[in-house]
Amino acid sequence: SQKIEQNSEALNIQEGKTATLTCNYTNYSPAYLQWYRQDPGRGPVFLLLIRENEKEKRKERLKVTFDTTLKQSLFHITASQPADSATYLCALGFQKLVFGTGTRLLVSP
Amino acid sequence: NAGVTQTPKFQVLKTGQSMTLQCAQDMNHNSMYWYRQDPGMGLRLIYYSASEGTTDKGEVPNGYNVSRLNKREFSLRLESAAPSQTSVYFCASSGGPSTNEKLFFGSGTQLSVL
């Protein structure tokens, strides 16, 4: 069956460092992959979309890579700030978008 | 521009009661979705509507019904609530001219079934 895995343990880093979150998937051949941010008590907010023919995509301090051979996406936040603390979700599919369980990021001052 | 609006924000039901969760979007999106989010389970798709007049089951449709009332509105109905339906429910939409694949979420409904 299709499966998306994100590290369920929280990632704790210091302000200014680069945070790297991982999304692995099995039994998918996605045309693209998306990343969302979710704050407590709020709905997820779209961050980035990367297509299967794109190796890397950047938006300000965010960078996403997509390796369809490894079936993995990496999500990087450079120069992290306490305001980046949130849960980050990856998602695959079209219309019936399937989400991973998310990884909580904690950035301490 | 309100985006996706869900009502109510909180609801407590007794087992067997019924209720309808309302969702409306003002972005002229074609597709709308209902997800539930449970600890450790992530977001799971209940139903979606690819366009006005169509609905389709997602991963966990049992115990729910939906209505795509018009292009703006997509409601989720629990006919006979069960404790297993205690969850946070999110409505989402997508399908704008330059935002086709991105989902825009509402702020959620916290539902408790006692």
Image (cartoon, coloured by chain):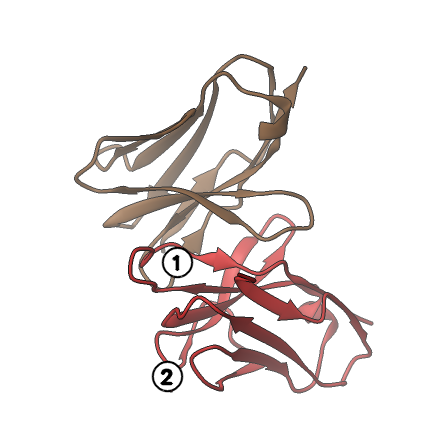
Chain colours: A brown, B red
In the rendered image, residue B75, in percent from the top left (x then y), is placed at 56, 80
Residue tagged by mark 2? B54
* Closer to the camera in the image, A2 or A59: A59
Disc 2 crowd rating (10 Å Cα; few below 14, some 14-19, many 20+) is few
Can the viewer see residue B63 in this picture?
no
Residue under mark 2: which chain is it in? B
Give me the C-alpha separation between circle 2 and circle 1.
Answer: 17 Å
Q: Position of residue B107 (x, y in %)?
A: 63, 58
Q: Secondary structure at mark 1?
A: loop
Which quarter of the figure is the N terminus of chain A placed in? bottom left
Q: Which residue is more in the foreground, B26 or B102?
A: B26
Where residue A33 appears, as percent x and y from the top left, is: 33, 45
Q: Residues within 10 Å of mark 1 (few under 14, many from 20)?
A: many
Residue beneath the point at 32% across and 34% down? A72
Mark 2 falls on what kind of element?
Answer: loop
Can residue B8 be seen here? The reply is yes
User: On the image, numbered disc 1 is attached to which residue?
Assistant: A97
Residue A54 shown left or right of residue B106 in the figure:
left
Q: Residue at x 57, y 73 (%)?
A: B23
> With A87 as the anchor, is B54 left or right in this view?
left
Q: Position of residue B110 (x, y in %)?
A: 72, 63
Q: Is residue A52 above or below residue B106?
A: above
User: Which mark is in front, 2 or 1?
Assistant: 2
Q: Amino acid at mark 1?
A: Leu
